[in-house]
């Protein structure tokens, strides 16, 4: 029987959260403190929250489903699910420093609460902890999974560096922007969608199909995330309205608008040349991005990504019901309100 996405996400939370708490607990207490805070288990004083929820759990859910897709129990993918979730969250801790973001999930980011130094070290510890999880029992599938995670992490870091370099460029080519997205967001989601099958010892062809699905999901995910960065409701995103425009990020809709050759795109370029944007400037920039076609083009591109993701699964030798659940999960991610 086909399972609904909320049911699958809740199953992941119940399976992964206790193991995640135990894993972070292996670290020295002072080092674990900012990590536990980031995951929403405690406040900055170390007082536990009664119902911690650190995110939707898309990546670990992909990992569990990819094991089931090749006929293996979800538990086989648990080390991979934990590892990819920890590595993803390491990137969030560091990204908040790079982007100068003061808030995540409706409260202060780790660097704001504990200082940039502690946040950097906490992120470093999380990255290594993810790899250690896979290598503590170095079976051949786990070694392959660890190598795959390391490669995905390297791609993610390269994508983050590309994203940072865009801040120093007056114009950003739209194709280059999509290349950055494939690295920064797509690579880790591609790993998440494949790691369960890797741990189950599936064939290269099957792993490749799941990986292609995850890559396209990652591209679509980032496209919608870029829209949320401009038009998202702060009560949903946990960040101030128009935050990406405030930071003058050259996200996909902005890159499309700047490259449009339209009058609106030219006016947006003038706004982006300013040292800072006040609230009126942010509102004007959002309107110009939309007028120049950035919003519609990004929505259309995200939907194209989802079609390609579904096509990748049709060519893979996987359980048809799980394939449908993966497509449902992708739709849940990409069809978020903005």
Image: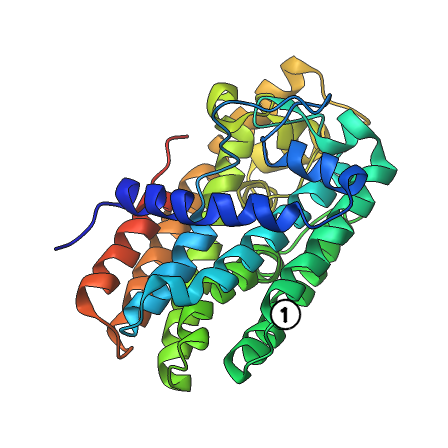
172 relative to 122 in the view: left or right: left
Q: Quadrant of residue 142?
A: bottom right
- In the rendered image, the residue lying farthest to the top is 280
> Residue 42's image quarter?
top right
Residue 99 on image: x %, y %: 73, 37
Most extreme residue toward the left, as rendered?
Answer: 1
Q: Is residue 98 above or below residue 63?
A: above
The residue sitting at 65% across, 47% down in the picture is 24
Identify which residue, 290 or 224, lies in the foreground.
224
Q: Residue at x 78, y 32 (%)?
A: 111
Residue at figure coordinates x 42%, y 78% from the top left: 208
How packed mark 1 is, by other alpha carbons closer than 10 Å (few <14, some 14-19, many 20 or more), is: few
Task: Please state, as top left, top right, bottom left or bottom right, where the C terminus lies in the image.
Answer: top left
**Going 59% across and 68% down the picture, which residue do you hit?**
134
Residue 30's image quarter?
Answer: top right
Q: Is residue 1 left or right of residue 256?
A: left
Asked whether residue 166 is in view, the answer is no
Quarter that holds the N terminus: bottom left
Q: Which residue is mark 1?
A: 136
- Residue 298 locus on image (x, y percent): 45, 45
Residue 288 image offset from top left, x and y in percent? 55, 29
Q: Secondary structure at mark 1?
A: loop
């Amino acid at each position: 029987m086909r399972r609904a996405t909320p049911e699958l996400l809740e199953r992941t939370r119940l399976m992964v959260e206790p193991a995640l708490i135990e894993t972070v607990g292996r670290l020295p207490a002072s080092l674990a403190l900012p990590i536990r805070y980031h995951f929403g288990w405690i406040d900055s004083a170390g007082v536990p929250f009664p119902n911690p929820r650190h995110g939707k759990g898309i990546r670990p859910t992909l990992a569990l489903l990819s094991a089931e897709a090749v006929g293996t129990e979800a538990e086989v993918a648990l080390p991979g699910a934990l590892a990819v979730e920890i590595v993803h969250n390491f990137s969030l801790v560091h990204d908040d420093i790079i982007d100068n973001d003061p808030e995540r999930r409706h409260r202060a980011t780790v660097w704001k609460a504990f200082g940039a130094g502690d946040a950097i070290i906490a992120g470093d510890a999380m990255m290594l902890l993810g790899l250690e999880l896979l290598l503590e029992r170095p079976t051949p599938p786990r070694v392959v999974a660890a190598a795959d995670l390391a490669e995905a992490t390297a791609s993610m870091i390269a994508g983050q560096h590309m994203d940072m370099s865009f801040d120093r460029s007056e114009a950003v080519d739209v194709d280059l922007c999509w290349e950055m997205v494939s690295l920064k967001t797509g690579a880790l989601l591609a790993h998440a969608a494949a790691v369960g099958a890797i741990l189950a010892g599936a064939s290269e062809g099957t792993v490749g199909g799941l990986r292609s699905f995850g890559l396209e999901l990652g591209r679509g995910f980032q496209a919608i995330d870029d829209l949320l960065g401009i038009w998202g409701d702060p009560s949903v995103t946990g960040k101030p309205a128009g935050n990406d425009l405030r930071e003058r990020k050259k996200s996909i809709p902005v890159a499309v608008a700047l490259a449009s050759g339209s009058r609106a795109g030219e006016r947006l370029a003038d706004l982006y040349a300013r040292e800072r944007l006040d609230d009126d400037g942010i509102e004007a920039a959002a309107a110009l991005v939309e007028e120049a076609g950035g919003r519609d083009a990004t929505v259309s591109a995200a939907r194209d990504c989802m079609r390609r993701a579904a096509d990748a699964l049709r060519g893979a030798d996987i359980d048809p019901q799980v394939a449908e659940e993966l497509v449902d999960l992708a739709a849940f991610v990409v069809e978020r309100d903005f």
